Structures are given as structure tokens and as C-alpha cells.
Image (cartoon, rainbow, N blue to C red):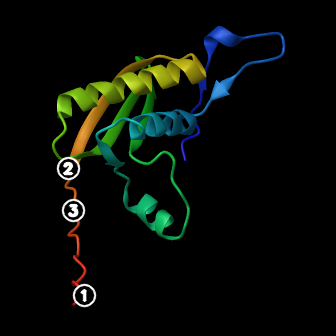
Amino acid sequence: MSELTFEMEEHHSELGRVEISPEVIEVIASIAASDVEGVASMRGNFATGVAERFGKKSHSKGVKVELGEEGIAISVYVIMNYGVSIPEVALSIQDHIRQGLKNMTALEASEINIFVVGVQFEAKEKQLEAPEAY
């Protein structure tokens, strides 16, 4: 786990300071991206896949946060539903993350990069017809 924290410069008070870890930013971004219509799922790595099989839910799945001199860089890895407009959904993901981050932390991301790593095809369910009673 990363030990880096990002200090919120705007909210110093006589009581102390407020620090937000990158993991919190990852969770906010992951939930915001998952709420966008057209996003089938978030892509995690092997470790998150194993953890989820044992019942542990990873709320930061598919998001990587880097804190640098330029600011906060967020990379989001998504699988989209088949038939959606990828540019429109990607823009909507960026807007949702930007707004969620601003509302919850008062922070601005310097960049929000969307990586579409797959397309989810909806499996058509065959309706079984009941045999007619004679």
C-alpha cells in the first residue's frame, strides 16, 4: 500500500490539518465510474480477483491514482457495454469522477485518463416455452 497522502491546503484550521490518502481517491473514482450508464464493470488486477473470490469486495477496483508535482493523475480501467458510444461514456466517466472528487474532497484532478479494456456483450436469454397441455 502506498503511504503517500495529499494534504488539503485549503482547509487548515486551528484544530489541525486534513489529509486524504490515495486509496480514498481511488474508491471515490471507482464508485463514480461504476455509476455511469454504459459501464459494464471495472477491471481489477489478479490480486483483486482472488480477493473477491474469497468474499472481499474491492471498492477501488480498476483505478490507479498517482500524486505528482503536476497534481493528481487518475487512471480508470473500464469494460463497457456493447453498443454504447465509447467517447460519450468516457467523457461522462471523467465528469462523474471530477464532480465526485470535488464534492467529497474539494480536490481537483490534473488529469483523468480512461482506458477501455474490454466490451461486455449481453447474452441473450432464450425464453423456454412451456409445452402446451393437450
Cβ–Cβ under 8 Å for marks 2 and 1: no
Provide the residue designation for mark 2.
119
Cβ–Cβ under 8 Å for marks 1 and 3: no
Residue 74 x/y as whole percent: 39, 30
Cβ–Cβ under 8 Å for marks 2 and 3: no
Dot 3: element: loop
Q: Would you say 40 lies left or right of 51 here?
A: left
How far separated are the C-alphas under marks 1 and 3? 30 Å
Q: Is residue 72 visible?
A: no
Which circle marks residue 133 in the picture? 1
Dot 2: element: strand
**Amino acid type, residue under disc 2 in the picture:** Val
- Residue drawn at the location 51% of the way across and 53% of the way down: 58
* Badge 3: residue crowd in 10 Å (few <14, some 14–19, many ≥20): few
How far separated are the C-alphas under marks 2 and 1? 42 Å
Q: Residue furthest front?
A: 134
Upstream in sequence: badge 2 or badge 1: 2
Provide the residue designation for mark 3.
123
* Badge 2: residue crowd in 10 Å (few <14, some 14–19, many ≥20): some
- Residue drawn at the location 37% of the way across and 35% of the way down: 36
Depth-wise, is mark 2 or mark 3 nearer the camera? Answer: 3
Residue 29 x/y as whole percent: 46, 34
**Amino acid type, residue under disc 1 in the picture:** Ala
Quarter of the image for residue 8 reads: top right
Quick one: 92 or 58, which is closer to the camera?
Answer: 92
